[in-house]
Image (tube, helix red, strand yellow):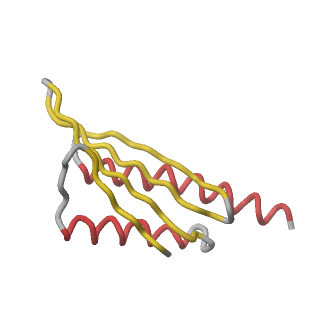
Amino acid sequence: MNIQITTRHESHISDDTKTFIEDEVRGLTKFYDKITSAHVVCDRETHKNGQEDTIELDLSVDGTTLSAKATEENLGKALDAVVEKMTRQLKKKNEKVKEHK
């Protein structure tokens, strides 16, 4: 699977964080194994109330694209939330494929 990680608004993430994100995205293959590519966008916005981290995850699956987005107070929580949302979508897609046969 091809995984592309980008950042917005000049936010920078460490190599350890990139490796962690890649591992989490690769873990999604246990719910649906026909994922061809993934695009992860990390964004950090600073407001007067604090910082918010947003992660957008787009997966190419069987010619279609599944998308999930989560905004939390730190990058770890945002990643957990977006992986949970994508897991639900992949399970649903897997059930539809099995029912069709």
Is residue 34 toward the left or the right of residue 100 in the image?
left
Residue that appears at 49% across and 49% down: 85
Identify which residue is drawn at 29% across, 40% down. Answer: 72
Is 78 above or below relative to 29? above
Quadrant of residue 40 within the rendered picture: bottom left
Reply above or below: 85 against 28: above
> How many circles with numbers are drawn on the protein?
0
- Residue at the spot x=52%, y=57% of the render? 87
Residue 45's place in the image compared with 100, above or below, is: above
The quadrant the C terminus occupies is bottom right
User: In the drawing, does residue 23 fall left or right of residue 84?
Assistant: left
Residue at coordinates 39% horizontally, 65% vertically from top-left? Answer: 4
Q: Nearer the viewer, residue 9 or 56?
A: 9
Q: Position of residue 99 (x, y in %)?
A: 82, 61
x and y, in percent, of residue 92 in the image: 66, 54
User: Does residue 18 appear to the left or right of 95 in the view shown?
Assistant: left
Please state the horizontal and vertical placement of residue 7, each as a whole percent of the image: 28, 52
28 vs 9, left or right, is right
- Residue placed most toward the observer, 85 or 60: 60
Single out the residue that lies furthest toward the right. Answer: 101
Quarter assignment of residue 63: bottom right
Q: Quadrant of residue 51?
A: top left
The answer to which of 28 and 57 lies nearer the viewer is 57
**59 versus 10 height, above or below:** below
